[in-house]
Amino acid sequence: MNVDSTSNLSFFLPKQPEIGKIKNCDGQSPPVFTPLKIRSMSLNNRLGISPMCVYSSSIEIDNVATEFHKIHYGSLASRAPGLIIVESVAVDPIGLITPNDLGLWNEKQATSQFNQITQVCHAFNTKVGVQISHAGRLASSAPPYKNFSYSLKETEGGWPSKIIAPSAASFDPQNFPTPKKMTITEVKEMIKKFGHSARLAVKAGYDFIEIHAAHGYLISEFLSPLCNTRNENDEYGGNWENRIRFLIEIVDEIRENIPVDMPLFVRVSASEYMEGKVPESWTINDTCKLSLELYKHGVDVLDVSSGGIDKDGVAPTPSKDTISSHRALPHEFFCEKIRETSKELIIASPGRIFTGPEANRLVTQGIVDIPLIGRAALKNPGIVWTMADELNVELEQAVEYGWPF
Ligand SMILES: Cc1cc2nc3c(=O)[nH]c(=O)nc-3n(C[C@H](O)[C@H](O)[C@H](O)COP(=O)(O)O)c2cc1C
């Protein structure tokens, strides 16, 4: 008996069903396992894999994706998430967080990501997007599995003298270099680089793009009054409208470089956790206001994260009570505020989502549309299947894995 194969693949794979789609459930489908359409992209369920760098490409081979990325993303894609957001991928070599990040500034990198990432995700009918980024003043760091929060010197393979940011202010003067302040020409060139990278992402076969505007990297440095101390006469500094301009122009540039029906996500740090510590910082009120602007400029999904901009800006530690009762996940309050302001934006958010009931509660209560799973997916690439079991739902699974159950 012949087994039908998935066509146009560089390897043999039995033809797959719509993995992640609900097959059977006792009673009404839990909202987290219902489909969602964003522009032309249809998701089989609402659970997403949060972007997570694996720092496994090599600078000697031009920051391309390797067989490891195929194993890593393939094992996630074959186990039923609604979508995967591929880790931070730099738009420019100076913008790599570490020398081992993926890059997306040339054709070779687009081809490697098609061969090692998007092709395998699509073979399992899983939607996959990429997070494009520039690390700004946090570039040239060591991979955290080697040395956490360590800035590499030239002799260690770093590029400290080339680091750029909106202003010449170091993340941590004791341990991080002082970046060069970007000129207006450099700012405008960088906006083009994001557009070029998005165009390459389309070529690489991604279904959607996420702009990384969080965690203290370049775009969030422009947003933050703490890092962006350019003056009012500079169109990218000073007042709020000027500080958001870099991100808004990147959104416009990317929209011009991707198909009209392709969804666009933006990840933000909803707060930099510096309220009360300094006179002015980026707060949830700024994020709410920004969400309206982003929607006007064609952003579909706001991915709500937090922190990373200042080393003293640390999220309050959740109490034992809130963790054990699963009542308040770290970004819940921010998502609720954004939802009150922006009715149309779809909200995604990560942060300690470890069980099916937790993820389902967020969707049922209308707080988050796409719960994102981070660390739990590193530990268990079948976490979405586990969550479905916890909610008594049977999902379509990969041909090879589903039949014995
Ligand atoms: C190993 C690792 C790498 C990460 N890399 C990225 C990244 O590339 N881009 C990003 O926006 N967030 C990154 N994050 C943050 C995650 O996407 C997620 O927001 C965070 O881990 C919180 O979710 P969790 O509690 O489910 O792990 C990373 C987190 C981890 C653990």
Image (cartoon, rainbow, N blue to C red):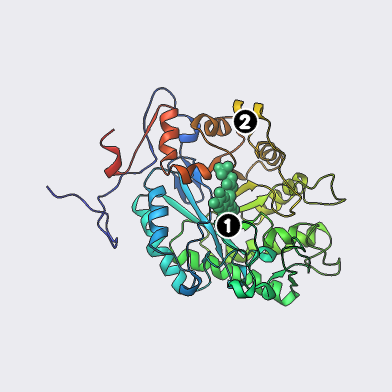
Q: Few, some or many C-alpha atoms within 10 Å of disc 1 (few <14, some 14-19, many ≥20)?
A: few
Residue 325 placed where, x, y %? Answer: 61, 25
Pointer 1 residue Cβ closer than 8 Å to ligand 1 = yes
Relative vertical location of residue 191 with respect to residue 403 in this rendering, above or below: below
Does 246 sit left or right of 141 as displayed?
right
Residue 21 placed where, x, y %? Answer: 39, 39
- Quadrant of image for the C terminus: top left
Relative vertical location of residue 382 with respect to residue 203 in this rendering, above or below: above
- Comparing labels 1 and 2, the label whose residue is closer to the camera: 1
Q: Residue at x 64, y 63 (%)?
A: 135
Relative vertical location of residue 100 with respect to residue 322 in this rendering, above or below: below
Q: Residue furthest left?
A: 1
Q: Does the residue at mark 1 contact the one at mark 2 (Cβ under 8 Å)?
A: no
Q: Residue at x 74, y 73 (%)?
A: 182
Q: Residue at x 88, y 50 (%)?
A: 279
Instruction: Tell me which amino acid carries mark 1.
Output: Pro
Cα–Cα span, label 1 and label 2: 26 Å
User: Is residue 326 visible in the rendered structure shown here?
Assistant: no
Indicate which disc residue 277 carries: none
Residue 362 placed where, x, y %? Answer: 58, 33
Instruction: Tell me which amino acid carries mark 2.
Output: Ile
Q: Few, some or many C-alpha atoms within 10 Å of disc 2 (few <14, some 14-19, many ≥20)?
A: some
Q: How many marks?
A: 2
Relative vertical location of residue 26 with respect to residue 155 in this rendering, above or below: above
Residue matched to label 1: 144
Q: Observer-nearest residue: 315 or 338? A: 315
Residue matched to label 2: 323
Q: Residue at x 48, y 62 (%)?
A: 56
Residue 378 placed where, x, y %? Answer: 47, 46
